[in-house]
Image (cartoon, grey):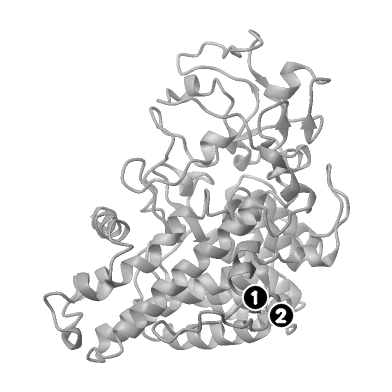
Amino acid sequence: MKKIYLLFLLNIAFATSCTDLSEDIYDAIPVEKFPENDKQAALISVPVYSPMKDLLDWGGWWFSQELPGDDVVCPTRLTDWDDGGKWRVLHTHEWTNETEAVTGMWGKFYEGIVEANQIIESLASAEQNSTTLQVISEVKTMRAFYYYLLIDNYGDVPYVTSFADADPEPMKNTRAEVYTSLVQDLEEAVLYLKNENIKTLATKQMANSLLAKLYLNAEVYSGQAEWAKAEAKCDSIIASGFYSLEANALAPFVTNNEKSSENIFTIPFDRDNLKGFNLHMRTLHYNHNETFDLTVGTWNGFAVTEDHFNSFSDDDARKEGFLYGPQFSSSGAALIDGTTGTPVVINPVIPALVMDASYTSEEIRMSGARVAKFEIASGANDNLSNDFPVFRYADVLLMKAEAMIRQGKNGDEYVNMVRERAGVDAWTNTSLDQLLEERSRELYWEGHRRQDLIRFGKFGDSWWEKAASSADRETYPIPLWATQGNPNLEL
């Protein structure tokens, strides 16, 4: 019922996103009386969530987190997937301020911030009761979430918290200044947030997860490490009792996964009503529609690197999220490639980032293990009904372990909870390098890799088809369209 109600509210929000909030919501209820009940409170906060639906696609966030890392790649397959090099430059760290993924994120993040500022100001004259405080805290938490994504990706950014009187050409604040403000806002907001297990709302444990991320990356953002605070926030989430690891490593990613015990905060998707989750289209071979009885043709693009694939032992349950080797239709018949006329056999080895006519058709069309970590329902279309986990309990356990190791403690207990669930051997005296590898295996395809590599000081390393890169690649440039509209962003 919660997801159905949320779908209803989100559809209202998306349909009216360009309208005047004061006209639509306050038409029948005086502003000082709003919100009168929980349903009205839920309605007013909905617009702040709407930009999230684009983060996995043209909003650019997912592409900008996974493709610059060493796990996921989008090779050029003869004439397919070149697209002016927009995927390749992410892999090679040669993006510019006009690269599509880089330019898309900026607008999406600030869209959420503007929505938040408008809602907060609109409630300033409302009666300041417990419901109003809860809504304002929820919206402030979502504003902090978008600012977290901004400083993580762009570094120094304008920190704007007003709406009506907002400077049309704001100056940038330093990354450290914004970080400090976010921590202060969240530590205050968490006191008033709902302490409930609602996976699509900014709850107390969502805010604790966000604070854990901020503290875990504090040294990157502010120059001052906060490992003990990161550990304490992980402890709060664990102690809440709301979450537990699923018995099956891929269970958090099934269709209609809104009840997963493992997911803390998710982006809701529905194939018909909340579209935007189409990563399966980008990775499946052209003939994989016969495997899943899809109603549309797939695009044969994204894959995982050979090194990432080989990092999984054969007994690792998480390896079941890959498609490789001979492929079959839903009836059990061998898939036949529509161009080569040969069986589709996916080879995890990708011969080159750019495969031109000197490569065989099989190499071009069938190289690179594909990703089915998120269940692809039989009969699905180009959008899936799997909610996307932004914060997940397994990540909390790994963050807890990392924070402990960085303080000179032993994090084996928490790493091994994740490893044992995957069916692999427990570790003793886990090192930071091992932990980074384990995060790769557990969290691939979920948008964590870029941030992890930066925090561990390895983002500039060389890897397959990527030379060593300089430290300035750890943040993206502010988009050209944004600096043209606001020259202060170049100062």
Residue named by callout 1? 487
Q: Secondary structure at mark 2?
A: loop
- Estimate how packed mark 2 is, as few (under 14), some (14 to 19) or many (20 or more) residues with alpha carbons within 10 Å: few
Q: Which mark is residue 463?
A: none
For residue 486, say whether it is visible.
Answer: yes
Residue 189 vertical placement versus 484 (above, below): below
Horizontal side, residue 435 vs residue 211: left or right: right
Residue toward you, 36 or 398: 36
Residue 284 vertical placement versus 278 (above, below): above
Q: Quadrant of the N terminus?
A: bottom left
Q: Amino acid at mark 2?
A: Leu
Horizontal side, residue 406 vs residue 469: left or right: left
Instruction: Tell us which disc is closer to us: 2 or 1.
Output: 1
Residue 107 in picture, x, y percent from top left: 53, 63
Q: Quadrant of the C terminus?
A: bottom right
Horizontal side, residue 465 vs residue 266: left or right: right
Residue toward you, 45 or 309: 45
Residue 249 in picture, x, y percent from top left: 54, 46
Discs 2, 1 touching: Cβ within 8 Å: yes
Residue 121 in picture, x, y percent from top left: 35, 85
